[in-house]
Structure formats: C-alpha cells, structure tokens
Image (spheres, rainbow, N blue to C red):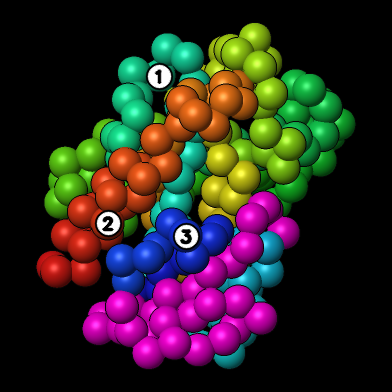
Amino acid sequence: MWLLLSPTSLEAPFLEGEPFSFLGRKGLRGEGFVYLETGIGKVNAALTLAAWAARNPVERALLFGIAGAYPGSGLQLGEVALVGEEVEADLGLREGLKPLGFPAWEKEGKRYYNRFPLDPGLTEALGHLLGLRVVVGLTRDLVSESPKEAQALAERWGAALENMEGAAFARACLALGIRGAELRAIANPVGLRDKGAWRIKEAVAALEEAVGRLLRV
C-alpha cells in the first residue's frame, strides 16, 4: 500500500478513489493507495505526513508534484525525475546550518544539517522501474525570483530542481522511520516568473504516466 502525497490536488487530478477529508484537505482511498493533499510548503508537508502516520501504519510514501528546473540541470519541461536527496536551503545561514554548530536532525549518531536523503533502496528501485534520473532537489519556502538567484542556489548546493516541500517530507520520513521517495515533473525554469512560459499541463500529464506505472506494478 502506498501513501501518496502532493502539495495540491491540481497535481493529482488523475487519481480515482473514495473521497474523504484529512486536516481539511482532499483525500482519496484507491486501489493500492491512500492519497493526501498536503497543502503548499514545508510545514504543511511534514504536518500532514506526521499526522497521518500517528493514526495509520505507513508502509511506504511517495511525495509527487511539479517543480522548477535549475540552469544547467539538463532537465527539460515535462520531464520527470526522482529526488534522491533534498537540501533545505533556507535553514541557518546562507552557507547552511552547520556553521552554527548544531544539526537539524540527529539519528543513530549521524547528524543531518541541510541535506536529507530519501530512502535509497526505494528510490533506486523506482529509478529502475520508471527509467528516471535521480537528482538533488532544493527546498525553500521562498522560491527563486530571478535566473541570477536560481543560478547562485544551484551552484551553491549542487541542486537540479527547486520545490517547496521535499526537504520537510524527507526529514519527516527519517524521523518517523518511513520509506519515502519523491517524484517531480518539471513545469518551469527556476526564476522565470512569466507563467505563460510554464508547462504545468504537460508536467501533470507526465506525473500521471509515472504514478500510473508505479501503481500498476
């Protein structure tokens, strides 16, 4: 059984199931999955996952949605990629949390500052199944507003795509012991605020293809 999550239900119009409400947002119970709309941003993503997991067993979880591609990433509009590691880039100093001397999370003697892995085994298996690249994602509550800002972030953190939820989801999975993976479809170049150049419809269609293949296995 999959727990599927997306920031908005607009990113999951293809899912069919019995509707219900969770934390005031859309939920679905379908064949082989439960779906939850988390709401946009880090707090919403972590809160939704933690609240559901506190009441229900979670075998494996997938966060999916649209994202922006950084310059030089090689990711094309409408392309889908898996995220193997998320960077929480607005936590701590510009260089991150480590210079301040304490981690965001510590587990089994390992300290996590701004980088949080998704489950490597699950991500690798999905990569083989779906034939997708595995990239580094970057999460901020404040999205990049110019190509210059986007380029600086991509270079500083070695990230390929930008989103608003992934690092919180990854960190919550670590804390709760949940096998988590993340799937993103590229809707726009990061830093380009002209929505006329975005390809949201194509990105959602790509998500439908990828998530559909996953659920058919």
Question: What amino acid type should be assigned to the residue bearing mark 2?
Answer: Glu
> Split into 4 quadrants, where in the image is the C terminus?
bottom left
The magenta stretch spans which residues? 16-43
Q: Secondary structure at mark 1?
A: loop
Please check the rendered image and state whether residue 188 is part of the magenta-colored stretch, yes or no.
Answer: no
Q: Position of residue 67 (x, y in %)?
A: 48, 39
Task: Kindly report which numbered mark, 3 or 1, lies closer to the viewer in this rendering.
Answer: 3
Placement of 97 over or under 53, stated as above or below: above
Work out how far the residue at label 3 is from the one at label 2, CA to CA, in angstroms: 12 Å
Q: Position of residue 205 (x, y in %)?
A: 28, 50
Work out how far the residue at label 2 is from the one at label 1, CA to CA, in angstroms: 23 Å
Q: Is residue 167 left or right of residue 149?
A: left
Q: Residue at x 74, y 47 (%)?
A: 104
Location of residue 102 by image quarter: top right
Q: Residue at x 44, y 87 (%)?
A: 19
Q: Secondary structure at mark 2?
A: helix
Task: Kindly report which numbered mark, 3 or 2, lies closer to the viewer in this rendering.
Answer: 3
- The crowding category of the residue bearing disc 3, from other C-alpha atoms within 10 Å (few below 14, some 14 to 19, many at least 20), is some
Q: Position of residue 3 (x, y in %)?
A: 41, 73
Residue receiving disc 1: 73
Please check the rendered image and state whether residue 42 is part of the magenta-colored stretch, yes or no.
Answer: yes
Residue receiving disc 3: 10
Tell me if label 3 and label 1 are in contact, CB under 8 Å.
no
Question: What amino acid type should be assigned to the residue bearing mark 3?
Answer: Leu
Question: What amino acid type should be assigned to the residue bearing mark 1?
Answer: Ser
Residue receiving disc 2: 208
Location of residue 46 by image quarter: bottom right
